Amino acid sequence: MKIVPGWFARPSILSADAPKGPWSNGNEGGGGPRNPWAQPPGGRKLPGKSSALDEFLKRTRGGDGGPGGGLGGLPTPINPRALWGIGTAVLVAIWLVATSFHQIGPRERGVVTYFGRYAGTLAPGIQLTPPAPIASVRKYDVSGARTENFPRGDGVNLTLTGDQNIVDLTYSVQWNIADPKDYAFQLARPEETVRAAAESAMRAVIATTTLNQALGSGRTTIESRVAEQTQALLNSYRAGVRIQGVSINRAAAPQQIVEDFNKVTVAQQEAVGEVNRARSYAQQVVAKAQGEAGAFDRVYAQYKLAPEVTRRRMYYETMEKVLARSDKTVVEQGGVVPYLPLTQSKRLPDAVPAVTAAPAAGGAQ
């Protein structure tokens, strides 16, 4: 190669024999570097010298490419099958992650099944299981209380009491999940089963309770008995449910017979008042009779000691009581006084005044 000094070297750059750029085609003459992405001179590859990039481009093009392929020539469209393969791989990875890792909350438990068969219960935290459809996880809240209201909404819940009365009863039952395994597998519809068991227990208890107890005095006893019977019934079903409590919200007469019911209530209250008054009068009569009997016993004891004196004393006391209600004046013989103030004597209304003399012989009559 000749070196031409000065301005004579400039035309040689534009001549056909001038060297090409750094990424020129290697088939042309010149001493410039060959395009690393193009084929070797002569249109053939060196045996056993393909790179990893060449292999990737071949797979994406669906073959070994042709002249002008690769990054140095015209772009070759990527095979759709390759895109489908990449998308499928991404979806499979997402599916594996989503169905294998499970976040169990602090108040939750996870029931694991392998092809529908119970395999265990997951504790709170991030847990790993085989992917679906091999494993399936159902989460249950075991701490939160659930409430069943009877009746639903603003309906009427008529219940027959033990004394053949009808009461409109509204109440609620609180419960939670005690065993997630039994709750998931033993009952097809556990919530409906809890409602049916609670309603059955309430009607059974009210059937042995009077109306007065249901309306007020026996509510606490009724609530505890209903909770116990409901829990026993659910335990026999292995429902995996714990009854937390029963609360009676309202107990009253049906709306259709409120007026008649109030009349019956008033009559019952009046009857209770009359019974109380009769008992009070009976107690007074009995007390008086007991007092009189005690006085008679004391008089009889004195009579046994001095019969004549006691007899005369009783006679005088009796005559005093009888004559105290009379307007007659008795004057004994030999004891007449010269002045007798008859105008000051005690008279009874509409009584005829009379003065009688005592017999000639004998005592006071």
Image: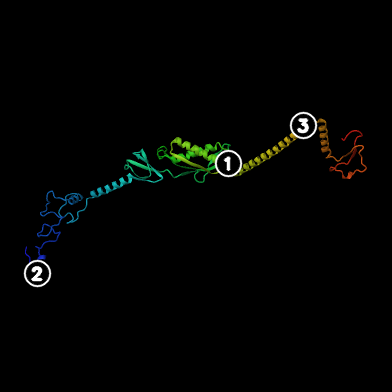
Query: Could you tell whether 175 is left or right of 47 in the image?
Result: right
The foreground one among 158 and 283 is 283
Mark 3 or 2, closer to the camera:
3
Q: Is residue 199 left or right of residue 297?
A: left
Q: How many marks?
A: 3
Label 3's element? helix
Farthest front residue in view: 305
Q: Position of residue 36 (x, y in %)?
A: 15, 55
- Observer-side mark, 1 or 3, equals 3
- Asked if marks 1 and 2 touch (Cβ < 8 Å), the reply is no
Judging by the rendered image, the residue that carries numbered circle 2 is: 6
Q: How many neighbours does mark 2 have within 10 angstroms: few (below 14), some (14-19), or many (20 or more)?
A: few
Mark nearer the N terminus (1 vs 2): 2
Q: What's the mark number on residue 217?
A: 1
Query: Could you say which is closer to the camera, residue 14 or residue 261?
Result: 14
Residues tagged 3 and 2 counted as in contact (Cβ below 8 A): no
Amino acid type, label 1:
Ser
Q: Which three-letter amino acid code belongs to the residue tagged 2?
A: Gly
Q: Position of residue 11 (x, y in %)?
A: 10, 67
**In the rendered image, which quarter is residue 192 located in?**
top left
Q: Who's the residue at 81% across and 30% down the image?
A: 307
Which residue is located at x 30 percent, y 45 percent? 96
Q: Amino acid at mark 3?
A: Ala
**Which residue does the numbered mark 3 point to in the structure image?**
301
Q: Is label 1 in contact with label 3 (beta carbons under 8 Å)?
A: no
